[in-house]
Amino acid sequence: MKQPPFTHRNLPRLLLQARESVMAHTRPGLRGHGLSDQQWRVLRVLGEDHAKGGAGVETGHIAREAFIIGPSLSGVLSRMERDGLIERERDANDQRRTVVRATRKGLDSVQTLSHTIEAHYRWMEQRLGKDKLQTLYGLLDEVIALDSQD
């Protein structure tokens, strides 16, 4: 039998497995609030903007920060608007752009879920150790930065 040509482990698969391991602890809380993974990622972006005193986030920025492609984001935002989690309006300075902000209901969801999610991060920190978790964050930041070094 011929040896496979790979010498390194399958990093994309490992990253996906790690993501699923983290999300396995988060999803039940999201589902309990009627949210999908994608809706949570949007709310997280909007919640962070709100905390900075922001006046809303342009949809292209949401797509990049939440890692949701444009056509999918449109459907996610429509469902979130229907459910009263967000509101959309045209950008006053550029009518071609749409600005999204979380409603009170959406921000309440962010506030409530943040406690559960932060508890999970504390659990991870306890299991892995603070230094290892910080190392993991640092390594992931370095891997992400590789893309911008070309």
Image: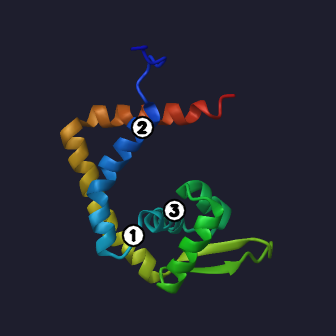
Compare marks 1 and 2 and give the one earlier in the sequence. Answer: 2
Residue 45, labelled with which disc?
Answer: 3
Horizontal side of 124 relative to 10 (left or right) equals left
Q: Position of residue 7 (x, y in %)?
A: 44, 16
Instruction: Using a 10 Å C-alpha cutoff, classify the residue at mark 2 as few (fewer than 14 neighbours), some (14 to 19) or many (20 or more).
Output: few
The one nearer the camera, 132 or 20, is 20
Q: Can residue 53 be seen here? A: yes
Horizontal side of 56 relative to 37 (left or right) equals right
Q: Are marks 3 and 2 in contact (CB under 8 Å)?
A: no
Is label 1 or label 2 in front? 2
Compare marks 1 and 3 and give the one earlier in the sequence. Answer: 3
State the image quarter where residue 33 is shown: bottom left
Q: CA distance from mark 1 to mark 2?
A: 29 Å
Residue at horizontal 24 percent and vertical 49 percent from the top? 122
Amino acid marked by disc 2: Arg
Residue at horizontal 59 percent and vertical 66 percent from the top? 72
Q: Position of residue 67 (x, y in %)?
A: 55, 54
Residue at horizontal 62 percent and vertical 71 percent from the top? 74
Q: Which residue is mark 2?
A: 13
Residue at horizontal 65 percent and vertical 34 percent from the top? 148
Q: CA distance from mark 1 to mark 3?
A: 10 Å
Q: CA distance from mark 3 to mark 2?
A: 25 Å
Q: Which residue is mark 1?
A: 110
Asked if 80 appears above or below 1 in the picture, the reply is: below
Instruction: Using a 10 Å C-alpha cutoff, classify the residue at mark 1 as few (fewer than 14 neighbours), some (14 to 19) or many (20 or more).
Output: many
